[in-house]
Image (spheres, rainbow, N blue to C red):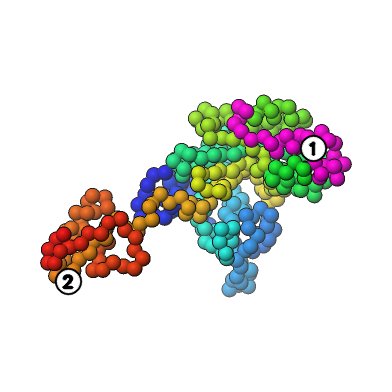
Amino acid sequence: MQQIPICRPDERAGLVLRELYHRHGYQPYRMSKFEPYDLYVRNKSFLVSENILTFTDTDGRLMALKPDVTLSIVKNAQAPAGALEKVYYSENVYRTSPASVGYREIMQTGLECIGALDAAAVGEVLILAAESLAALGGGAYLLDLGHMELVAGLLEGLAEGVRTELLAELGRKNMTAIRSLCAQAGAPHRLADRLCRLSRLYGTPEEVLPQLEELAEGPRVRAALDELAELCGVLECRGLLENLRLDFSIANNMSYYNGIIFRGYLPGLAGGVLAGGRYDNLMRRMGKTGGAVGFAVYLDQLERLDGDSGCDVDVLLLYGPGDSPAAVARRAGALMSQGKSVRTERGVPAGLRCREIVRFGEGGEA
């Protein structure tokens, strides 16, 4: 990732990603910090966290500090018929985090492609997800790709509650629970076998796609597999296949997601830093036509990846009461001309971390 000075890791990443998305023709999207609370109440299952900060506005409306950006973008989407609306954002969201107690203000960057989606548009979003991870991880990353329709096609005909439970156990790769749920639902052993095989599949497209061929019964599953193969070809033509893995344990909410779903990971972080997928179902739920695909990068996770050695400043320049202010300024300027950050003080500040301390002599330069 390009090193930009005097920025926190999330700020540096946000600048790099916005420049990347702008190069691909995506337009910046700005939104208010607040939205009517009912927008989030109606779509709680789409949110990362259901905890929402609310307040009563001066006109009596119950408002919320936004816990999510995608819902607002979809609500205001106005892609012309047969065209695409391509936007990117860098916004603060307000929600609880698994890594902390209480609410946090979290910087989140991402993009959405909305409207008349085709394979080229979906492939471009997947390319941008991979390039985002490459920019943040210096080329070291993993992008896991699955397909909701492939899973949904296998689960077709089962009750909604059973499908939801099976999705959860597929995510845990819990084959015992999968078989138990299928038995309780009266599903054929063949389905349990296929779901268990699917839960075990993880690897490169070259390894996994041939095995998926054996599961591709029915037009829904077949179409999903064909799209996966096509998207892998798109990534391959851009030299991005090496870091791609196919994984169907990342499938989740079928009420909102359809089509591809993906997660991105960086070395040194236990959880995912990027999440996205296709969500035509959300579009229809909000009265919109067309499709939508996008992703978000959770920049708060990057706090653990700061490449800095933990120093606040390169050089602490200490001077005494007899030292000439001009000499101090001259010496500080000389150090900064070497590319170093410099703090001038008469004493060592409590808690300051520096790589080097430079001291002036009594009445002269060090």
What residue is at 59 percent from the left and 49 percent from the top? 77
- Which of the 4 quarters of the picture holds residue 20? top left
Pick the residue in front: 230 or 271: 271
Q: Is residue 185 above or below residue 309?
A: above
Residue 175 place in picture, x, y as percent? 75, 41
Quadrant containing the C terminus is bottom left
Residue 163 at x, y percent in the picture: 78, 45
Q: What residue is shown at x 63% (from left), y 69% (from top)?
A: 61
Mark 2: amino acid: Pro
Q: Is residue 171 left or right of residue 186?
A: left
Check disc 2: other Cα within 10 Å, few if <14, some if 14-19, many if 20+.
few
Amino acid tagged 1: Ala
The stretch drawn in magenta includes residue 233: no
Q: Secondary structure at mark 1?
A: helix
For label 2, the residue is 321
Which of the two labelled residues, at mark 2 and mark 1, occupies the earlier sequence position?
1
Within-10-Å neighbours for mark 1: few <14, some 14–19, many 20+: many
Residue 12: give x, y in percent of width and height. 42, 51
Bounds of the magenta segment: 178-207
Nearer the observer, 3 or 169: 169
Residue holding disc 1: 192
Q: How far across and how far down the image is residue 151, in percent?
A: 72, 38
Residue displayed at 57% across by 64% down: 101
